[in-house]
Image: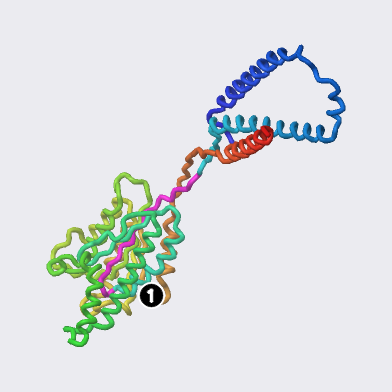
Amino acid sequence: MELMYGKVVAFGLIAVAVFIAGLFYVKRKTSFIYASGIKAANTKRLKQSKLYRSLEQRYIVLRCILIAGIIGSIVSSLVLIARPYKKDDIYSGVKKRDIILCLDVSYSLYDLNYEITDYLKEVVKGLEGDRIGINIFNTSTVTYVPLTDDYEYVLQKLDELSEYFVLQKEYQDKYGEYTYIPDELLDEYMELAYKLDYYDAGTLYNNQSKGSSLVGEGLGTALYSFPYLGESDRTRVIIMCTDNELNARKKQIMDLEDAANACAQNNVTVFGIFPSEEVFYAPDEYNYDSCKEEFKSAVESTGGKFYVRTRDQAVSEIVKDIQKQEAMLVKVVMSRQYVDLPYIPFTILIICLALGLSAGLVLQR
């Protein structure tokens, strides 16, 4: 413990000493007035009595307690005024990694998306200092979670996304093969569609004219979600999940190749997760190998790694491998803070005041 204003104690004790010396001087001077007074005789026997000795001992004890209480109160008060404190040097490792999860939320990917969001909940619980964000895209991109280290908020939003992918699965299982909805299923369908609209309203904006699964724009938006792209020295990662089944009805603002080049130029590494051929959506309309190779080429051009989700390679293994490859850059930062420590002197002050007042009240009787 240190005192921020240590001189206060020194000057205070000097002032108290001067004051006490003055009191003794005045008391000694006034005591001479009674030096020539009439003296009582035969007090020796009285002083030797048991009652007198008992009262005298009690008086001495109470007086010592009173004096100790006064001195303790004065000293503890001076210490409190001097502000006792301690210095804490806090060394913190700042993990300088930003991660954006970029999910293609086309209904064809509900199973893969559910698996990755479900596993990432455990990953997020173990993070300490990394910032994480979530973008979801189809026709348009929604910044679902901006970059943050508020992991409770991220977990809450991941739970919501998991519910969204469960609803997508329910929709695909029940109504995916219908060209029109039978009357007996219409109410149930409308209720489910209403829940899905909460998410789809953002990601399917203008889909009638623009198309769907605009992968290049999804990746480009994730890239420009990072703040201060040209200035930051943070390690930046995009984990992107898509089947690359582009259905553009107009020219994209940024195609996949352009977005990957922009990522490479801004030192943003992309890790891609692609579905297996067994669950690839609409193989009659899209060529699996072409979609895979185009996405793989884009990912690897940023220095990242491409993964195919298979039975032998679960999402958990993929994410673990990504974490292993992209080591966190740690910078040790020291910050000093001053913590006040008033508790001990304040407690002593209260105890001394209580003792002194108690002793004084008893002596007055």
Relative to 131, 190 lies left or right: left
Give the total of numbered labels.
1
The picture places residue 16, in percent across and down from the top left corner, at 61, 23
Question: Is-magenta flag for residue 281?
Answer: no
The picture places residue 181, in percent across and down from the top left corner, at 18, 84
Residues in magenta, as a range: 91-108
Residue highlighted by disc 1:
310
Instruction: Give, as a three-letter code, the residue at label 1.
Output: Thr
At horizontal 85% and vertical 32% (from top left) the residue drawn is 49
The picture places residue 260, in percent across and down from the top left corner, at 27, 58
Question: Is-magenta flag for residue 95?
Answer: yes
Q: In the image, is residue 177 above or below residue 301?
A: below
Quarter the C terminus occupies: top right
Q: In the image, is residue 78 above or below residue 100?
A: above
Q: Nearer the viewer, residue 126 or 201?
A: 201
Mark 1: which secondary structure?
loop
At horizontal 24% and vertical 75% (from top left) the residue drawn is 287
Chief secondary structure of the magenta portion: strand
